[in-house]
Image (cartoon, rainbow, N blue to C red):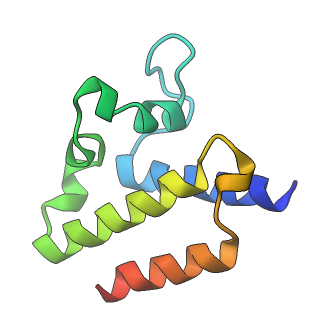
């Protein structure tokens, strides 16, 4: 595995947690979890609509944290490996989300 590959895999795990969906679920022809999440805006879906509703109903602060983690997951699963953050930056962004 490469470093960008590891970051991508970590992003997929975050997406699994946030959506409560498996990466290989049926999202349509040729669409996996990553593509499904990244194309949500073009389908007119908000982040809240793709995240597991059980996660965002706990509190407003928790919902805000989950949205921040979703942003991190989307950066980690960028199509171009060069656009993905380094793992150190991922950890920093997750700590910021936790403290927000």
Q: Above or below — where is 3 with respect to 51?
A: below
Residue drawn where x is 38% and y is 46% of the image: 20
Residue drawn where x is 54% and y is 28% of the image: 32
Q: Which residue extends farthest front? A: 83
Q: Measured from the top left, where is residue 98 in percent x and y? A: 36, 83
Q: Quadrant of the C terminus?
A: bottom left
* Number of callouts: 0
Q: Say whether residue 2 is left or right of residue 37.
A: right
In this view, the residue in front, 83 or 99, is: 83
Q: Measured from the top left, where is residue 17 in percent x and y? A: 43, 55
Q: Measured from the top left, where is residue 70 in percent x and y? A: 39, 57
Q: Which residue extends farthest bottom? A: 99
Splitting the image into 4 quarters, where does residue 1 fall?
Answer: bottom right
Q: Which residue extends farthest right? A: 1
Q: Say whether residue 96 is left or right of residue 42.
A: right
Splitting the image into 4 quarters, where does residue 68 fall?
Answer: bottom left
In this view, the residue in front, 21 or 11, is: 11
């Amino acid at each position: 595995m490469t470093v960008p590959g590891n970051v991508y895999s970590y992003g997929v795990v975050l997406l699994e947690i946030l959506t409560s969906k498996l990466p290989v679920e049926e999202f349509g022809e040729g669409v996996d979890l990553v593509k499904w999440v990244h194309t949500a805006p073009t389908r007119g879906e908000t982040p809240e609509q793709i995240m597991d509703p059980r996660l965002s109903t706990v509190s407003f602060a928790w919902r805000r944290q989950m949205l921040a983690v979703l942003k991190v997951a989307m950066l980690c699963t960028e199509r171009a490996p060069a656009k993905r953050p380094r793992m150190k930056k991922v950890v920093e962004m997750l700590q910021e989300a936790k403290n927000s």
